[in-house]
Amino acid sequence: MSRLTSTLLLWKSSRRRPTPTTNDLPKYNYQADAEGNYSFESCEGTVIALRYNNEFVSEITSGQQAGVLLDQTCFYAEAGGQIYDVGFLAKTDDESTEFAVKNVQVKAGYVLHVGSVEGCLRLGDRALCTIDGVNYTSNILLSSLTFLLTLQTLHVRSL
């Protein structure tokens, strides 16, 4: 178990002030039209933790590669054979601050957005989560193809 995961497990179960895990249900808020074009809803989340250089910090600034934990997200984390979403977190009260999400993982029930920031992001800031729809659509196709290939492989092995 990684140090981050064990720290988050302790954080989640703290008797003093347990921190609820990330609500990631907004990741299911999307629609497809008859032509197969997808539209995705953004959502807002509050920064509940920031991770930089393997430590929890109170803020991250321009150029830093870091991890951001939100109370709510619309990003899909890597799981079940499907790759993670990419996109952006934009600070709601300062549009010049943007966090480019390059990887998304789940650790102890918390969704960790990994990437780099331009501007300054602090604990308690509100951020608008926006996924890259083109990347998401590619991921859906790739996941479907992987599933079909796995089924075919299982069929051939059973002959």
Image (spheres, grey):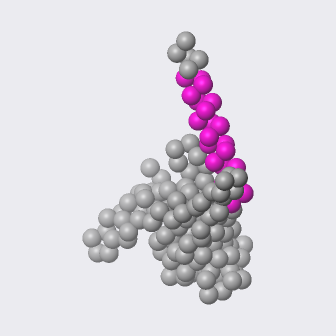
- Picture mark count: 0
Q: Which percent across, then down, holds residue 7?
A: 42, 62
Asked if the stretch drawn in magenta spans residue 149, the answer is yes
Q: Is residue 103 above or below residue 157?
A: below
User: Which of the 4 image quadrants contains residue 77?
Assistant: bottom right
Q: Residue furthest bottom?
A: 93
Residue occupying the point 56% across, 20% down:
155
Left or right of 10: which side holds 149? Answer: right
Q: Is residue 83 above or below residue 10?
A: above
Asked if the stretch drawn in magenta spans residue 147, the answer is yes
Q: Which percent across, then down, holds residue 128?
A: 60, 76
Residue occupying the point 48% across, 63% down:
24
User: Which of the 4 image quadrants contains residue 96?
Assistant: bottom right
User: Which of the 4 image quadrants contains residue 112?
Assistant: bottom right
Q: What secondary structure is the stretch in magenta mostly built from?
A: helix
Residue 9, visible in the rendered structure: yes
Left or right of 129: which side holds 49? Answer: left
Residue occupying the point 50% across, 56% down:
106
Q: Is residue 22 above or below residue 106?
A: below
The quarter of the picture where the C terminus appears is: top right
Q: Residue furthest front?
A: 34
Q: Which percent across, then down, holds residue 45?
A: 52, 75
Seen from the viewer's position, the closer of residues 77 and 67 is 77
Seen from the viewer's position, the closer of residues 113 and 135 is 135
Residue 115, visible in the rendered structure: no
Residue occupying the point 67% across, 44% down:
141
Over which residues does the magenta segment extend? Answer: 133-154
Q: Which percent across, then down, holds residue 147?
A: 58, 35
Q: Residue furthest left?
A: 15
